[in-house]
Amino acid sequence: MAANKGVGIGARIDRGHLSVHQIDAMFVGKRLAILISADPNASGDAAGQAKLMDTADVQIESVADSRRVSLADKYGIRLCFMPDSIDVGMLARFAGKPGTISFSVIGDAPRGGDTADEDGGED
């Protein structure tokens, strides 16, 4: 049976906020209850870029799996959602935008192809 392919979003976290042990315990192989909020005060848009949306009230609440963490200049995570659990168009609005992620660990991520992306990288 083919795996149900989903969608994902990458995120970067400044290393000063968490130790390697903390980031590992929070994100490696975990299923998370997620609230993603756009930061309406961020200056993440390129100069002269037209604003496509008002980010003041843009939020997504869902469940996502996080498989791995990358350890570059910033920690990198990839949150993987099942396609029927999230509005893909709304998720796309967060691409390249600063914001916040609030979460709680609700269990271990299932092994195998039950989530969007197995590579664990970031966008």
Image: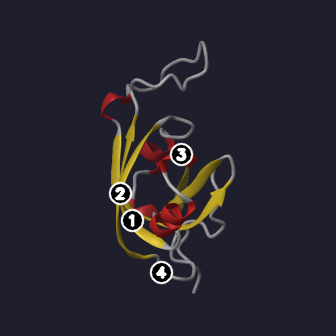
Dot 2 falls on a residue whose secondary structure is: strand
Indicate the amino acid at tag 2: Phe
Circle nearer the N terminus (1, 2) = 1
Helix, strand or loop under label 4? loop
CB of mark 1 within 8 Å of CB of mark 2?
yes
What residue is rendered at 39% in x and 56% in y? 86
Q: CA distance from mark 1 to mark 4?
A: 12 Å
The vertical placement of 95 against 111, above or below, is above
Front: mark 4 or 3 = 3
* Residue on which disc 3 sits: 16
Residue 14 shows in this picture: no
Residue 22: where, in percent of width, then height?
48, 63
Question: Camera-side residue: 72 or 9?
Answer: 72
Q: Earlier in the sequence, mark 1 or mark 4?
A: 1
60 on left or right of 2: left
- From the viewer's perspective, tell me whether residue 112 is left or right of residue 121: left
**Which residue has dot 2 on it?**
103
Q: Is residue 14 above or below residue 77?
A: above
Mark 2 or mark 3, which is nearer the start of the sequence? 3
